[in-house]
Image (cartoon, rainbow, N blue to C red):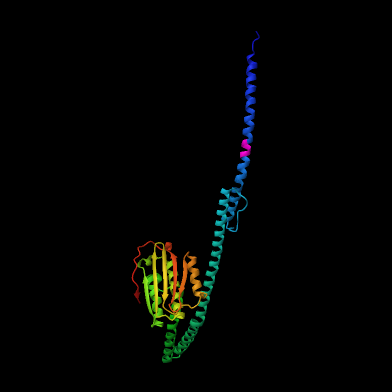
Amino acid sequence: MRETDPHNEILEVWNEFTDSLITPALFSGLTVLLIYLFVGRALRPLEALAKALEKVGDGRYQTRFGGKLAPELARLRDSFNRMAARLSAADAENRRLNEQLLTLQEQERSELARDLHDEVSPFLFAINIDAASASRMLSEGRTAEAREHVQSITDAVRPMQRHVRSMLGRLRPIGLEEFGLKEAIENMIAFWRRRRPEIRYQLAISTGCESLSELVGRTICRIVQESLCNALRHAHPTLITVLIDYQGEEVRIEIIDDGRGVCEPSRPGYGLVGIGERVRAMGGRLSFSSKPGEGFAVEAILPAAFRREAACVPVQAEEL
């Protein structure tokens, strides 16, 4: 009987084993390769999306992401494009607001320069002449005549003070920093009452509004100031009501008159356009409502995030 060589049998078993592994190994290699190619192709749009996000992060909001994609990635693409479009619109709006604010600043500076030239400069010139004349007369011993020129200087200083105070009030509402929002608006109303005493004024302002930030307070003053001017100039009212209150996270400002209203829709004047730009720059809203013969109303909503936290207790309207 022939004996079997153990070495040959082991080699034969090993060869069979390795032959049986070749097919799974080739199959696994091809599978891994296909998965790599498929996943790489599927993730390639994400790389393009990452580059698009970098462009948007650099401020290039016109960037858009396109191409045919899987449904899941298509939703991501559409969301990205909507986000980029909104950022682009917001950027354009911010640029427009900045241009409007610069225009408003130049307009205010031009008006102040004109007032200084037309109202203050002549008085300064007159004071200079009177001072020179008084000095000459005093040196000549003509005291009585010099006294008249000194009195003329005093008389010229008073209207200058009024004009300068008026200009300061336009730059910064009088009393806002020193006494608070309520007194600053009362000063505005008192200013117009002296000139239009036949009109009644009502003011209702929440006591907690004294905690509003200076920025919100100045904006409210500008809204009230422009609205009062428009009502007195165009509406011929008998009553003007100013309401300032906030609920939740918003501050509401209303200026209502009982004048003749607006018969037909018209383009707002430069002043209303200006306060509209101020309000939108703060993230607020401004609206107008009017009916012929029933008056005109201005309503502004400002975010209360600009105020310090404080309790707010509404008060009843009081006639001033």
Indicate the position of residue 185 as horizontal and vertical percent values.
Answer: 40, 73
Indicate the position of residue 311 as horizontal and vertical percent values.
Answer: 35, 63
Position of 282 relative to 256 (above/below): above
Indicate the position of residue 110 as horizontal and vertical percent values.
Answer: 53, 76
Q: Residue furthest top?
A: 1
For the question of whether residue 151 can be seen, the reply is yes
Assign the magenta stretch its main secondary structure: helix
In the rendered structure, does residue 272 fall within the stretch colored magenta? no
Rendering quarter of residue 102? bottom right
On screen, residue 313 versus residue 31, left or right, reads left
In this view, the residue in front, 237 or 216, is 237
- For image coordinates 50% across by 72% down, the residue present is 274
Magenta stretch, residue numbers: 31-35
Rendering quarter of residue 34? top right
In this view, the residue in front, 101 or 288, is 288
- For image coordinates 42% across by 71% down, the residue present is 254
- Which quadrant does the C terminus fall into? bottom left
